[in-house]
Amino acid sequence: MKDVNVPALVVFVLFFALVTVMGFLASRWRRAGDAAHLDEWGLGGRSFGTWVTWFLLGGDLYTAYTFIAVPALVYATGAGGFFAVPYTIIAYLLVFLFLPRLWSVSRVHGYVTPADFVRGRYGSRPLSLVIALTGILATMPYIALQLVGIQAVLDVLGVGGGENANWFVKDLPLFIAFGVLAAYTYSSGLRAPALIAFVKDALVYIVIIVAVIYIPIRLGGYGHIFDTVSEHFKQAPKAGGMTLTDDNKKWTYATLGLGSAMALFMYPHSVTGVLASKSRNTVRRNMAIMPAYSLMLGLLALLGFMALAAGIGKGDKGFNPQLSVPQLFANMFPDWFTGVAFAAIGIGALVPAAIMSIAAANLFTRNVYKEWLKPAATSADETRVAKLVSLLVKVGALVFVLGMDKQAAINLQLLGGLWILQTFVAIVAGLFTRWFHHWALFAGWAAGMVYGTWQAYNISNPKTTHFGGNAAEIPGIGHLGYIGLTAFALNLVVAVALTLVLRAVKAPVGPDETRPADYSAEAGDDELKNAPEPVAAH
Amino acid sequence: MVLLGGLAGAQDVLPGCGADGEPSGAEPKMPSDPDPTDTGAPGPGAAVPAVTPERVLAALALLVPIVAMLWVPSYNKNDPALAGIPFFYWYQLLWVPASAVFTVAAYLLINRDEKARKAARNGGAR
């Protein structure tokens, strides 16, 4: 391999040390009364205002893997990789409609997870369980991918160890990073990533702004970059192009954008970020200011083109596109600023990994442990179990990354998006109507999961024979589209059809503990007077 | 577009919602509405109706950028380029701040709507 880039490594380690200290100190930040309550550890006391929530959600949704994968996709396929932009635009517009309702009903009834809501709304334990398990299943590979992001950076820094270094030396930096992460998540809960998110987002903004100004200057301007890239895709039309060249690509682009947008806020870690905010309007305001991150993501995607124009990986057949952006930074920036950029990516992995493990821990604790294993669990029990599970989840992710092929993690993450989208009908429809029958929702979920997984299994690409992509022919339309969205459509059709049948035969319905007014309750309203009040009741 | 119907407060209009009865005390339907504000509540004495101009406009504001983004053929081209950046890229990037403007509009509209609802409710309760 190459030599270690010492100045970059020093800067990288300094930033890492800084956020570690912050992570441990975070347990004292905005500390509230009852530290033993799960709302404290798992939702930061439901106390975050507009700006903290903005940083937290930004730190949460735009992960290190996003920074690596989006430009990598643009680098490899051109226009098709740009779907991330419509995706994030659509996401905030969509969720503006239903997240405020989820916040309100969760606040009134003390729900910590989306599965809690499903339990309360439909009174169905099995439905709530599968929603929780889907969330955990979709989150695990996502955490593993954060490690892949850190690995990419460490590789380019030259501390990944050579091919002949033994596995322990090779992965030691990864062990250290995750050991530290696990320790402060355990002790500080959601407050740690919330505080570190300030550093992460600030670094990311600085790096992106510098990159989109400085790198084009060195490469001869945007016009030159796009000319070079355009020439590249003319030589290799199979890889992609500057625009979407056929109808299949257009359909895939639109369905991926829409499907991913719908899936984004079904992820448990996104919901955790939302429920941690202190008021309904905080949630709404954030949907209006989140696009600042989308703009950054769009600019980031262009870095894929800059890497192409700079000749990164040119002539190297086995070059991994995932390394294109880290390598671009290393080639273009002075060493110390490469360190800053890599710190941004590295810390960009820690924040979401912490929130994801907290979200998965909340799901397990509330919807598996308390619901099925120990109904008599006190709040203190819940918090203790959640802390332990957050550790287990991270160890699981680490084992996953070390023991399995990286391709497997990427495939599973693709599947994760598809799976989590199948919880959409139960959760979002439930926020507006109780019309659906819980058995029908269960059947719809099962149909979507099976169909989507089976379709994905059948997709091959040059690298793998199964799970090689996320687009397949849409039955009835005939073009290629995102499997997740097709599976969602099937899920919806099954749920509607079965609900009609079940209502016709007057199948029994579970109790609904929510009332219409719960869905529009705002902080300070009457509905919240009797709400569980674990929050720092100042 | 299942969701957009939802914005119009499906919960308030679907009678089947509270299937198990339980009249919620939180939405009192009292006749006196001292401050109908500008929602133009048509029903005599009813609280603010589920579909108000504010809610419809907000739904439209949210719908416009979604349609623009899903209408891929409208921007799938290289020209006109802007400062060397093909249309495909700068057009979509431009929609990012544009979508934020539309969301702010929806936010203001919904805020106004919720204030009117709250006023109507409190007016009825007291």
Image (cartoon, coloured by chain):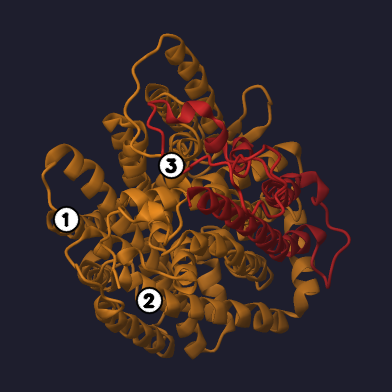
Q: Colour of chain A?
A: orange
Query: How far apart are the alpha carbons under marks 1 and 3?
Result: 28 Å
Query: Circles 1 and 3: CB distance less than 8 Å?
Result: no
> Chain under label 1?
A
Q: Is A19 on the left or on the right of B50, as rendered?
A: left
The quarter of the displayed image where residue B22 is located: top left
The quarter of the displayed image where residue A35 is located: bottom left
Identify the residue at image location x=36%, y=51%: A108
Identify the residue at image location x=11%, y=42%: A374
The circle drawn on residue A420 is 3
In this rendering, the answer to whether A480 lies above or below A409 is above
| Label 2 packing within 10 angstroms: few (<14), some (14-19), many (20+) | many
Would you say residue A133 is visible in this rendering?
Answer: yes
Amino acid type at mark 1:
Ser
| Label 3 packing within 10 angstroms: few (<14), some (14-19), many (20+) | many
Residue placed under numbered mark 2 in the picture: A196
Nearer the N terminus, badge 1 or badge 3? 1
The quarter of the displayed image where residue A59 is located: bottom left
| Mark 1, secondary structure of its residue | helix
Amino acid type at mark 3:
Ile
The circle drawn on residue A379 is 1
Chain letter tied to red: B
Query: How far apart are the alpha carbons under marks 3 and 2?
Result: 27 Å
Q: Is A387 on the left or on the right of A195, as rendered?
A: left
